[in-house]
Image: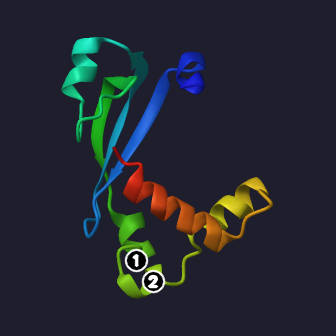
Amino acid sequence: MRYILQEPHVGLLFLIPSQGETLRVNGRACIIRDPAVLERSTAEGKRPLLAIGIEVDECFLHCPKAIKRSSLWEQENRATLPSVGQIIIDHTGVTGMTAQQIDERLLKEGRNGLY
């Protein structure tokens, strides 16, 4: 949220499993506090405190060559990738938790903290 306040320009890349094409959206983000908008965003009985809106400047499909060449959607290739926990440790230098502990925590929060 702080970043949006400082620099509202954003780029979003939407990936769809098993599809090569990606959708790119570029625009400006804003933080929304409008109660009517937040009410429409209620899920599982929980209303968000804030929302992020995007004013779209451009939207286009990316060529699928890089995704297809990477074979990321091939199940056998995913097993060789590091876990999210390992990526977090490698990029942030966080200490005090193992990659497995981070992965387990993310999994638990994903199940229990989604709504």
Q: Quadrant of residue 105?
A: bottom right
Residue 11 sits above or below residue 79 on the image: above
Please say which color scheme the image uses.
rainbow
The residue lying toward the viewer, choosing from 75 and 64, is 75
Query: In this view, which residue lies farthest toward the bottom?
Result: 76
Amino acid found under the numbered disc labelled 2:
Asn
Q: Quadrant of residue 52?
A: top left
Q: Residue at x 57, y 71 (%)?
A: 83
Nearer to us in this view, 6 or 64: 6
What residue is rendered at 46% in x and 30% in y? 10
Residue 109 in view of the camera: yes
Q: Nearer the viewer, residue 99 or 58?
A: 99
Instruction: Give the numbered dot on residue 77.
Output: 2
Residue type of the residue flagged with mark 1: Ser
Q: Which one is closest to the eye, mark 2 or mark 1?
A: 2
- Residue 110 location (% of width, % of height): 42, 56
Residue 24, above or below 69: above
- Asked if labels 1 and 2 touch by Cβ distance under 8 angstroms, the answer is yes
How packed mark 2 is, by other alpha carbons closer than 10 Å (few <14, some 14-19, many 20 or more), is few
Residue 84 appearing in the image: no
